[in-house]
Image (cartoon, rainbow, N blue to C red):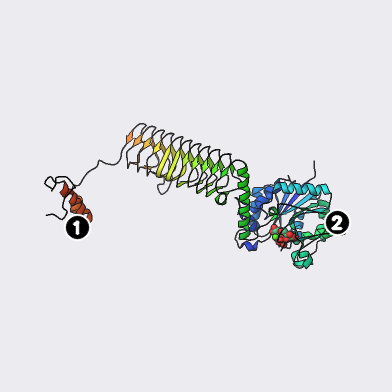
Amino acid sequence: MSQQITVIVLAAGGGTRMKSKTMKVLHPIAGRSMVGHVLAAASAVEPTRVVAVVGHQREQVGPHVTDLLPDAVLAVQETQDGTGHAVRMAWEALGDDARSGTVLVVTGDTPLLQGDSLRAFLDAHTGSGRAMSILTGVVADPFGYGRIVRAADGSVEAIVEQKEASEEQAAIREINSGILAFDATFLDAALPRIGNDNAKGEYYLTDTVALARQDGLGVGAFPIDDVMQTEGANDRAQLAALAAEMNRRILDRWMRDGVTVVDPTSTWIDVDVRLEPDVTLLPGVQLLGTTVVAEDAVIGPDTTLRDVEVGAGAKVVRTHGELAVIGAGANVGPFSYLRPGTELGAGGKIGAFVETKNAQIGEGAKVPHLSYVGDATIGEGANIGAGTIFANYDGVQKHRTSIGAHAKTASNNTFVAPVNVGDGAATGAGSVIRRDVPPGALAVTSGPQRHYEEWAQNRRAGTKQAEAAARAADAERPDAGTGEPGVGSDPAGE
Ligand code: UD1
Ligand code: CA
């Protein structure tokens, strides 16, 4: 077996600058928590074990970590006495079998971190045979970071924290990313030797550098080119900046893989979304969660899909959808609202101002205009008239409606569930369907049309409605002026 790798994720700090009920590392970026991104990157080094150090709001953070990584060990740090103390808590949570191999320490708030970078860093560390290595970055503004102090021969002498840095040290732009690799035997011996006699009164993990030097052991430093991968979000402004950067990277990857993104600045794609080549995304599109879009589909403009599956060649315009399936070649929108459980068959249509929920709409079936379809099955090739309501709720329970294959229902129908309309059946306009309609039958529920003559003149006397009715009635009388109904009559006459 190759050498074991232990990953320690530091996630106990408060993150007070987020000013949030939600713990810092749980804030999402591109559909995944910050710590979730770090755990995903860590998994790329195929660790033997992962320990997460939790403290602040550990009742939120702990379950979240084990949700994502059931094998993770949780180490509790009751008080946040520094990064050295945090790693000691992790160490104590592990058995003796962890005290060999390599230990990789990462922080839980660097969402852009990539597995490849961690792997390259670990390889460099292992290859160097040193007691410890630091992943460093050269940044424009090093304020707040630990500075890397190198000797004339380039070897690392110390990491000096902001508060302890001399003016000369503060000018150093190579910083500690917070990602460190240790030989486990060295770390085991060094942890108890870290003190807290410093400006912050904390146990600094970075003191391990000085301890290694005291022991005559080498310390490596490997700068990462892409420093954003090691940047953390401490407040909402940094969170937004990192989210925008991550989105840019996600879009770049999809564009390189053959997806057309018309306006990258207004398009947002979560990290777990999957797209096929020749998908087109128009401006204002958000693809969230585990949304999947097949080739030649066109999404947008102005469409939000969360956990939606879109088939090849489908068109989805100005739509909000969640937990829905849109078949190949189907048309959705504009202004459609697809709620969970919507399944639109291939070539089907959900049109303007249509809301659907828990509805299976068959191949080629169409609900084109102004309708609510809840708890329904609509057979293949059926057509639902404009302004149809599937009345699924009796105030106590939800019930289902089923419409048969190739049925044609007319405008302004209400289907009072539970009710079934047979294959090939039809309905009349304005029908309220309460009883099952047999296959092939035409169901009509509105009564014959009746006229109460001169109702307006009698019941609405003195109104413009009555005046208009009287004018029209006069004009139609055979003795009226020109004889041409409605033309040349004199409303003020007589
Ligand atoms: C630390 C480093 C600094 C480095 C910087 C990179 C030390 C002493 N300093 O400084 O050299 O440039 O990170 O961002 O290590 N944490 C705990 N428990 C604690 C303290 C911290 O879990 O008691 C966690 C935090 O949640 C955070 C990480 O460790 O994820 C870093 O802690 P933070 O307080 O931000 O350290 P810095 O002062 O930024
Ligand atoms: Ca920090």
- In x, y percent, where is residue 421? 38, 36
User: Residue 161 appears in which quarter of the rendering?
Assistant: bottom right
Viewer-nearest of discs 1 and 2: 2
Asked whether residue 491 appears in the rendered view, the answer is yes
Label 1, label 2: how many angstroms apart (C-alpha)? 104 Å
Q: Tell me the residue that label 2 is attached to.
A: 153
Q: Which mark is residue 462?
A: 1
Which residue type does callout 1 highlight? Gly
* Placement of the N terminus among the 4 image quadrants: top right
Q: Taking 467 as reference, is 317 above or below it?
A: above
Question: Quick one: SS at disc 1?
Answer: loop
The answer to whether mark 1 and mark 2 are in CB contact below 8 A is no
**Disc 2 marks which amino acid?**
Asp
Q: Under tag 2, what secondary structure?
A: loop
User: Which one is in front, 5 or 487?
Assistant: 487
* Residue 444: % across, % down: 31, 38
Specify whether 369 is left or right of 295: left
Q: Quadrant of ligand 2?
A: bottom right
Query: Relative to residue 224, is residue 29 drawn left or right?
Result: left
The answer to which quarter of the image holds residue 350 is top left
Q: Is mark 2 within 8 Å of ligand 1?
A: no
The reply to whether residue 94 is in sight is no
190 with respect to 453 (left or right): right
Q: Position of residue 86 (x, y in %)?
A: 74, 58
Callout 1: CB less than 8 Å from ligand 1: no
The one nearer the camera, 476 or 114, is: 476
Question: Does residue 200 lie above or below 110 as drawn?
Answer: below
